[in-house]
Amino acid sequence: MPAVSDRPRASGTGSVPVPGVTDGGGWGVYGQEEAVSSLRRALRSKRLAHAHLFAGPSGVGRATLARRLAQALCCEAAGADAEEPGEVPCRECQSCRLVEVGSAPDIETISTGGLCDESGANHRDHAQDGSTRIRVCQVRRLERLAALAPFSAPRRIFVVDSADDLQHEAAQALLKTLEEPPGETLLVLLASDPEALPATLRSRCQLLRLAPLPPATLARALEQHASLEAEDAARLAREAGGRYGLALRLHADPSHAVLRESAVSELERLTVADRAERLDYADTLARRWGRERASVLELLDHWRDWWRERLLAASGLGPEPGPDAAAAREAASALSALQRARAHLLGNVVAQFALEVLMLDLPARHAPSGEEAGAKPALA
């Protein structure tokens, strides 16, 4: 399937804006006007914070916003024709293109499986070991690079994608950099659940929240800015849960939609499964965790996205009529259970136990038997 661009569709008189949806005044970040405006004001006044936390579900535009901020700082002709120069990256010069493809010399992304400075027989290659955490050795590499002067940009820029994956020791090491940042450094943390991060880490960052768009609004944006047909745009908007970036990924690679559909099917089956079936499934997932950790985390992420959509709908923010207080409480409970399970799996809790607790905590849609009414394990 052909790739799609997030550039506005050209016409004889220029693109026609979608009602209620803008691209951030040239930033190409749709539906996140408040976050873009905040960054543009900071750039205009030259009061950009040394650390930012972009919070929101994956696919909502966090990484795109981080790239646009980096481009605005590095652009060779930012805002040359604008009333407020320096705020809008041209996205066409060599510097902007290098940022877009991840090759800019002064911009580093820190993620699971990334580079670190340590070596030796006892040190694992994180790119090959299936690592699911950002490790302290990777943050130490960030610290070393942050102490260097930028090569060509006004700042060295580090994007942590995502901060949800920081190992505890890595988070503590990153905190030291946030507390005493080098003068020419900008750190951007991306996170799905900022409240799950250490409070000390959050407090040292400028927090910007990014939220999904209403599906109908996203569908209009996809029609206009990504040149999609109305039927495809409406379907993708629903499947993506209002997230522009995820909708584009689903369109470019249908396998994402297949994986999501499979994950949701499993979740729906579990909602009517009895206690024994749920524990059997926990055992299956625990064995998979030993071989394919990333696939288990991806499954939980799909479940989280599904429950987040239910929460939005029950709160009156989705396409279905609402609000529904009981359904909202159920969705919030499921999201909390999934967040705990993810944290436990990435911590030192035995996977079998963490997944059994998750299976018993997820909402059920069947009457519990006498066995199910009994005590269940608790995990703080």
Image (cartoon, rainbow, N blue to C red):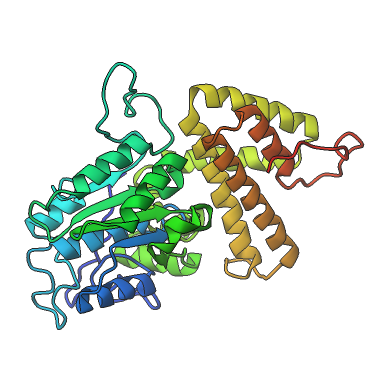
Residue at the far bottom in the pictured view: 83
- Say if residue 266 shows up in the picture: yes
- Say if residue 167 shows up in the picture: no
Figure quadrant of residue 170: top left
In this rendering, position of residue 125 left or right of residue 367: left
In this rendering, position of residue 262 left or right of residue 322: left
Q: Position of residue 43 (x, y in %)?
A: 22, 73
Query: How many callouts does the rendering have?
Result: 0
Q: Position of residue 135 (x, y in %)?
A: 38, 36
Q: Residue at x 40, y 27 (%)?
A: 130
Query: Considering only vertical position in the picture, is 26 above or below 195?
Result: below
Q: Position of residue 248 (x, y in %)?
A: 36, 53
In this rendering, position of residue 183 left or right of residue 59: left
Residue at the far top in the pictured view: 121
Quadrant of the drawing holding the N terminus: top left
In the foreground, 156 or 77? 156
Quadrant of the drawing holding the C terminus: top right
Q: Residue at x 42, y 37 (%)?
A: 133
In the foreground, 60 or 13? 60
Q: Position of residue 109 (x, y in %)?
A: 27, 46
Q: Residue at x 30, y 16 (%)?
A: 121
Figure quadrant of residue 349: top right
Query: Considering only vertical position in the picture, is 79 above or below 377?
Result: below
Query: Considering only vertical position in the picture, is 208 above or below 263?
Result: below
Q: Residue at x 60, y 29 (%)?
A: 351
In the foreground, 165 or 31? 165
